[in-house]
Structure formats: C-alpha cells, structure tokens
Amino acid sequence: MTWRSTDIAGATLADGASREVLLGTTSVLLIRSQGRLYALDAICPHLGGLLADGLLEGERLTCPEHAAAFDVRDGHVLADPFGIEPPLDGVGPLTAFAVRVEAGTIEVDLPDR
C-alpha cells in the first residue's frame, strides 16, 4: 500500500460533503461525515453510477442511478439496487481505503499496482 496525496486541504472538505479525486488510475470519493474522513470507490459497482452525484445522509451514501446504498465507514451494502433492504444481492461492496491528513493535506492509502 502507498499513501498518495490528493492535493486537497483537509479543512476544505466540509462535514456532509464529498469530492471525487483521481489518484493515478483510481477514482476515489472523499467524504467527511460526522467529523470523520472516509475514502471509497467513486463508482458504483452495480452499473457504474457516479457516487459523487449520490445522496449522502449521515453515514449512508445512495447511488444516483438505482438507489443502491452503502455505509461510508466501510463500504458495505445497506440496500440493493432499487432500494431493497435488507440487501439480498445485486451489488457488491465498495472498496474502502485508509485516509489521513498529513501536513494539512488529505492522503489515501492505495494498493500498489
């Protein structure tokens, strides 16, 4: 794993906000929820919805395409596509990445390629 700088100041990501960044070839969604930073896959594994356009409610992120919902803390599925709860199948979890603020800048720990 390798820590990669996002070049985004940690103080600029407001609580309840998200921002997509491209780190090499990996699209990562940065989220600040309830004062904590998270980093997840930025693309929904169901049909490729852009999660930056999704609805963030507390620690729940809902895909704008088909209402699949994910927990921002670890990427696990809360609702299948079309909002089915509890999830039965149809979409896998998001990859969650370790995230930190170093010298004021958000960094994400990505797998070595």
Image (cartoon, rainbow, N blue to C red):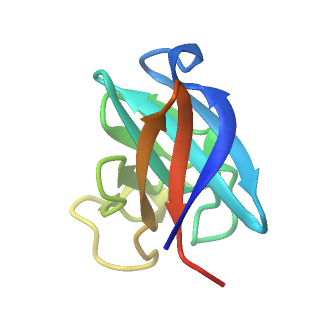
The quadrant in which residue 43 appears is bottom right
Q: How many marks?
A: 0
Please state the horizontal and vertical placement of residue 94, each as a whole percent of the image. 45, 66
Residue at image coords 31%, 21%: 35
Please state the horizontal and vertical placement of residue 22, each as a whole percent of the image. 76, 53
The quadrant in which residue 18 appears is top right
Give the vertical position of 45 relative to 70 (above or below).
below
Residue at image coords 25%, 58%: 85
With 48 as the anchor, is 66 left or right in this view? Answer: left
The quadrant in which residue 36 appears is top left
- Tell me if residue 53 can be seen: no
Residue at image coords 58%, 71%: 46
Residue placed farthest to the left in the image?
Answer: 86
- Tell me if residue 105 can be seen: yes
Give the vertical position of 102 relative to 70 (above or below).
above
Give the vertical position of 50 relative to 84 (above or below).
above
Please state the horizontal and vertical placement of residue 7, each as a whole percent of the image. 71, 35
Please state the horizontal and vertical placement of residue 56, each as a whole percent of the image. 45, 32
Residue placed farthest to the front in the image?
Answer: 103
Quarter of the image containing the C terminus? bottom right
Residue at image coords 45%, 78%: 90
Along the line of sight, the residue nearer the viewer: 2 or 89: 2
Along the line of sight, the residue nearer the viewer: 34 or 100: 100
Along the line of sight, the residue nearer the viewer: 43 or 85: 43
